[in-house]
Image (spheres, rainbow, N blue to C red):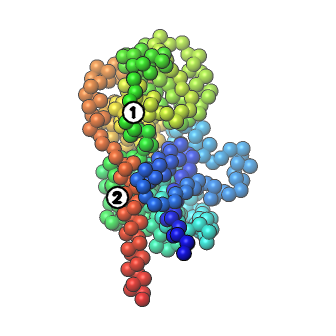
Amino acid sequence: MSPEAPVLVELIYFNAGGGHRASALALEAAIARAGLPWRVCRTNLFEVFDPQARFRQWTGMDPEELYNKRLARGWTLGLTHELRLLQGMIRLSHERMVQALRHHWGEHHRPAMVVSLVPNFNRSMSDALERALPGTPFVTVMTDLADCPPSFWIEPQTSQIVVCGSPHSVQQARAAGVPQQRIWETSGMILGEQFYADVQQDRAAERVRMGLDAHSPVGLVLFGSEGSKEMLPIARRLTDTPLILACGRNAELAQALRALKRNAPTVVLDFTREMARIMRLADFFIGKPGSGSLSEAVLMGLPPIVVRNAWTMPQERFCTDWVRDNGLGLVLPHFKAIAPAVQTLLADLPRYQAATRRMHNRAAFEVPQVLAQILHNAGQQARQAEHQAA
């Protein structure tokens, strides 16, 4: 008799913003680290909807690239209205997307559990999975600290199981009408294993090697994997503050920052997969209030300085409340005030650093166990149904 095939668990992501793919990779690694006997596959949702890549053929770019280019240029004003327009288009395309997903989950691809790490499309995925593979658990692991209702992360009218990374998102799920047995809470966002590694690092020597002062406070400026043009005026206004400027894949921005004349030591980074190592060299964080990068910074002990205004994306607005309510750092109306804000933060840096240490994010260890329990419960329900039918 051939050995039983391992359980297949499918992780759904896309590349808009970069955080969803990073979360999928982090979850895959966390599952392996937990020793769960599963075979994990990752699926880019847009490749299911457009397997022939016609959008790229017509436009010369993938759908996610439009969004990423807007982030890099700071064109985020009005995204709330555009989000509602997008959601309306998704509703109109619901049956077409369900059919594409049903075909994907056909005879040759039958996961025991599907885990979504993306917003907006969870109703389509849940409905399609229920039609293709009835009883197969559909789980959404939120990669934001809060939902942006309606129909962003939480879809109460479906059989979706939602994993929430904050008490606030748990309350949102309950208020939306999700049954308690389909709500699971973790202590934060799921992050990569590098952020939990116990690394013995000569911090002072590494700083000197990079051209920084061994002991002067250093700020890390980070606006996600696509960077942001906002980093240029920040670097100018903080000319006397040592900075690490992480530009991600934005080569044009990196070139402009390298050409900038500043008084203080400056390190300009291109895209790197060693962000945890870089964060260990910094003392505070400046950037956009994204759940992923903020959670990474706080876990690494970096008090954040972020902005909330009309340009702040709707799904990131709660993050500014999270920073303020937990005393983690400063929330500004705009980065024109960044220089006095840095002075204020550094004057009370130990207190802010102590606040970051009170945030115990263990989601990378919790989420695999949550998924294992969900899969176990689904198996029990299936066996009970078979017993009743017999």
What's under tag 2, amino acid-wise?
Trp
- How far across and how far down the image is residue 38, in percent? 48, 60
* Left or right relative to 16: residue 139: left
Quadrant holding the C terminus: bottom left
Residues packed near mark 1 inside 10 Å, few (<14), some (14 to 19) or many (20 plus): few
Quadrant holding the N terminus: bottom right
The circle on residue 199 is 1
Residue furthest front in the image: 1
Q: Name the residue beneath numbered marker 2.
A: 184
- How far across and how far down the image is residue 194, in percent? 44, 39
Q: Which quadrant holds residue 299? A: top left
| 378 is higher (above) or lower (below) than 193 | below
The first of marks 2 and 1 along the sequence is: 2
| 291 is higher (above) or lower (below) than 350 | below
> Looking at the image, which residue is at 68% across and 57% down?
51
**Element marked by disc 1:** loop
> Looking at the image, which residue is at 35% across and 23% down?
341
